[in-house]
Image (spheres, rainbow, N blue to C red):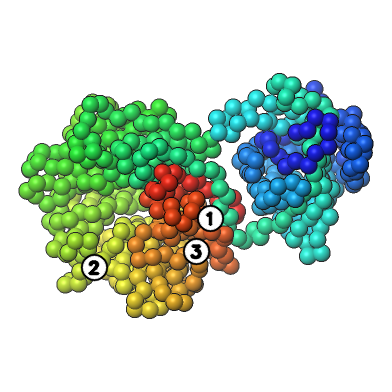
């Protein structure tokens, strides 16, 4: 903020907490401001206006409106403001985002909002949501400033913020001026601001179509000299973990991007670690070590201490844990991991996920009849594991699906389903996906989408979802409400690359060619975000696109998880809550995005 000299600056280079009622430590009674006119009459505002006038600048106020005293915290950087906290129950408060897309004097703030308080007689909220063309407001705000990376806030001021804007003829933008004046310094050094300090400049509000999904960049995390190999995000979207090729695991906070290392047992002979697995409550994170085969499971919520240190079974012959992400039951008291034996078929092993830091063995195993255990996935009710088995198929291919009952500590293989008789089915690099009810599994042989019954007759049905015979079925994902099965297809030419189905009937209700779904025959990722129907696709080259699979089926703007085309090698993608994490192998970096609309 400028000290008593008019200067065009970006509004909102600080995070704000705005009080709905009186702030007891503010020294200013919001009740004294019964209109925007009365807020304008405050001495600090008048002082700012005088300085502007002396510099040949003018600010035109609107009259008769009442100031809005909003409640919410706003995380900010020099280029972004994101609303992250709603107000008390029953309050109708703004939710949305701001992004500065140019430098002063042409700041552009892009808002997305679904609800909000009236900001004056005319509603800024109404302009944001598209129900009004007007966009004028005054706000009585308490503002915090600090370092978002460290989370340390050192300044707190009471501010008056004025917008005076004129809508465009099409109602899509509103341009004009802003004035942000410090009324009082509540805490912090003199550099935090004194009454009369102000920011002044031109601004443009652009309406955001609420039917278009938006991924807003949160920032990135540098993981060091080693490459990231995998990433997971907790269900709330608050924190995550990234594994590296150096055999380390880092915990990171999503909002602050601060990182810390998990403490691995020493000494050890670990050469690398396998993919990360996280329990559904987000309370545990685990992985398999290679070279010196162990399963390590850590407390994910707090201190990151070891909750289980498991050694591989030695009977009926010596075994090693397979580099498959550990799975956890609903309360994370039991974990499951694949085992390869020297002289026997592979198995699913059960371990105590809360055994403590001391070395323990597995509780029991369920052995398959087929070879080549390559991936495992847990049913929604955590009572069944579906495992892809190669059998006698060539390397990189598989033809069996093993179903394991893990509802007790003595698991048993329920069925091994031959998915294609003599056909060797190519599962590429994608595991199976359960329907929300767990009664079906969706996977692919490349040419077809397969649906497999997980009980009863264990039937297998194949569905043609491609436009051309050279196309390849790739990713599958099921929405949290269970109503949408999304399938990506690697295509050529103008063929459709995204197919949406009803998982219950397998009826297709949309085929589309979406630029953001242009996946290749290998790599890439797809997942639904939280409890929304927004599908996020990473195309295998670092381009990340949100697509709303609910009518009217709108794709959002593609974001890049790389700095240049030559560094777009992606190791993994994960979704937790409304946060998307993309691990860039070449740049040794994790890019973070948040779904801010809808």
Q: Earlier in the sequence, mark 1 or mark 2?
A: 2
When the figure is inspected, residue 38 is found, relative to residue 456, above or below; the finding is above
Pick whichever, 587 or 597, lies toward us.
587
Please say whether residue 299 is visible from this viewpoint.
Answer: yes
State the residue position of label 2.
425
Distance of mark 1 from mark 2, alpha carbons?
34 Å
Disc number lying in front (2 or 3):
3
Mark 1 or mark 3: which comes first in sequence? Answer: 3
Q: Residue 547: image x %, image y %?
A: 52, 61
How many tags in the picture?
3
Q: Residues within 10 Å of mark 1 (few under 14, many from 20)?
A: some
Q: Residue beneath label 1, please? A: 559
Residue 227 or residue 438, whichever sits in front? 227
Q: Nearer the viewer, residue 89 or 258?
A: 258
**Which residue occupies the foreground of this view, 210 or 584?**
584
Q: Up-down: is 462 above or below 303?
A: below
On residue 516, the disc is 3
- Quadrant of the drawing holding the N terminus: top right
Q: Of callouts 2 and 3, which one flags the residue occurring earlier in the amino acid sequence?
A: 2
Determine whether, in the image, residue 396 is placed left or right of residue 595.
left
Q: Is disc 2 placed on a helix, strand or loop?
A: loop
Q: Going 27% across and 32% down the picture, which residue do you hit? A: 308
Separation (CA) of disc 2 from disc 3: 27 Å
Q: Could you say where residue 381 lies in the image, as x and y percent from the top left?
A: 35, 49
Mark in front: 1 vs 2: 1
Q: Position of residue 402 (x, y in %)?
A: 21, 57
Q: How far from the left and from the top, in percent, is residue 496? A: 45, 74
Secondary structure beneath label 3:
helix
Seen at 49% across and 72% down, the residue is 512
Q: Residue placed at 55% from the left, 30% from the top?
A: 150
Find residue 327 and name its label: none
Q: Is residue 424 above or below residue 591?
A: below
């Amino acid at each position: 903020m400028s000290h008593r000299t008019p200067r065009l600056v970006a509004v909102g280079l600080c995070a704000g907490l705005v009080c709905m009622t009186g702030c007891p430590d503010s020294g200013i009674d919001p009740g004294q401001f019964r209109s925007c006119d009365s807020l304008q009459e405050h001495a600090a505002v008048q002082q700012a206006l005088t300085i502007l006038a002396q510099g040949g600048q003018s600010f035109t106020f609107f009259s008769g409106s009442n100031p809005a005293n909003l409640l919410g915290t706003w995380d900010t950087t020099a280029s972004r403001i994101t609303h992250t906290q709603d107000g008390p129950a029953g309050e109708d408060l703004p939710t949305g985002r701001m992004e500065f897309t140019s430098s002063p004097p042409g700041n552009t703030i892009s808002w997305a909002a679904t609800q909000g308080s009236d900001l004056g007689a005319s509603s800024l909220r109404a302009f944001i949501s598209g129900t009004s063309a007007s966009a004028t407001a005054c706000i009585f705000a308490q503002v915090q400033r600090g370092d978002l990376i460290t989370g340390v806030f050192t300044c707190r001021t009471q501010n008056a913020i004025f917008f005076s804007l004129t809508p465009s003829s099409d109602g899509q933008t509103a341009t004009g001026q802003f004035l942000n004046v410090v009324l009082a310094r509540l805490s912090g050094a003199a550099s935090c601001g004194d009454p009369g300090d102000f920011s002044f400049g031109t601004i443009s509000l652009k309406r955001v179509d609420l039917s278009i999904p938006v991924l807003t960049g949160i920032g990135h995390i540098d993981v060091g000299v080693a490459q990231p190999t995998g990433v997971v995000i907790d269900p709330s979207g608050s924190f995550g973990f990234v594994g590296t090729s150096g055999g380390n695991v880092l915990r990171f906070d999503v909002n602050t991007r601060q990182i810390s290392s998990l403490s691995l047992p020493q000494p050890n002979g670990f050469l690398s670690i396998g993919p990360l697995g996280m329990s559904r409550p987000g309370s545990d994170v685990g992985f398999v070590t290679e070279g010196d085969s162990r399963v390590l499971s850590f407390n994910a919520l707090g201190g990151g201490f070891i909750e289980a240190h498991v050694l591989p079974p030695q009977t009926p012959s010596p075994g090693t844990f397979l580099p498959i992400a550990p799975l956890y039951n609903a309360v994370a008291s039991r974990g499951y991991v694949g085992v390869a034996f020297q002289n026997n078929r592979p198995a699913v092993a059960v371990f105590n996920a809360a055994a403590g830091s001391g070395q323990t063995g597995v509780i029991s195993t369920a052995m398959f009849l087929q070879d080549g255990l390559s991936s495992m996935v847990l049913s929604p009710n955590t009572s069944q594991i579906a495992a892809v088995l190669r059998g006698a198929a060539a390397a990189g291919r598989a033809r069996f699906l093993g179903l394991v009952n893990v509802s007790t500590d003595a698991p048993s293989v329920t069925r091994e389903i031959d998915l294609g008789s003599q056909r060797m089915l190519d599962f590429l690099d994608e595991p199976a996906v359960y329907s929300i009810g767990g009664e079906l599994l969706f996977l692919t042989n490349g040419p077809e989408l397969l649906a497999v019954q997980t009980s009863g007759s264990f039937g297998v049905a194949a569905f043609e979802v491609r436009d051309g015979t050279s196309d390849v079925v790739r990713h599958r994902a099921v929405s949290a409400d269970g109503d949408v099965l999304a399938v990506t297809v690697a295509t050529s030419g103008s063929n459709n690359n995204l197919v949406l189905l009803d998982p219950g009937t397998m009826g297709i209700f949309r085929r589309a060619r979406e630029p953001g779904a242009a996946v290749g025959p290998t790599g890439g990722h797809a997942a639904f975000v939280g409890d929304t129907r927004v599908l996020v696709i990473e195309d295998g080259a670092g381009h990340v696109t949100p697509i709303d699979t609910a009518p009217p089926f709108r794709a959002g703007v593609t974001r890049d998880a790389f700095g240049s085309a030559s560094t777009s090698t992606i190791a993994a993608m994960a979704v937790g809550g409304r946060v998307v994490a993309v691990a860039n192998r070449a740049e040794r970096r994790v890019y973070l995005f948040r779904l801010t609309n809808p």
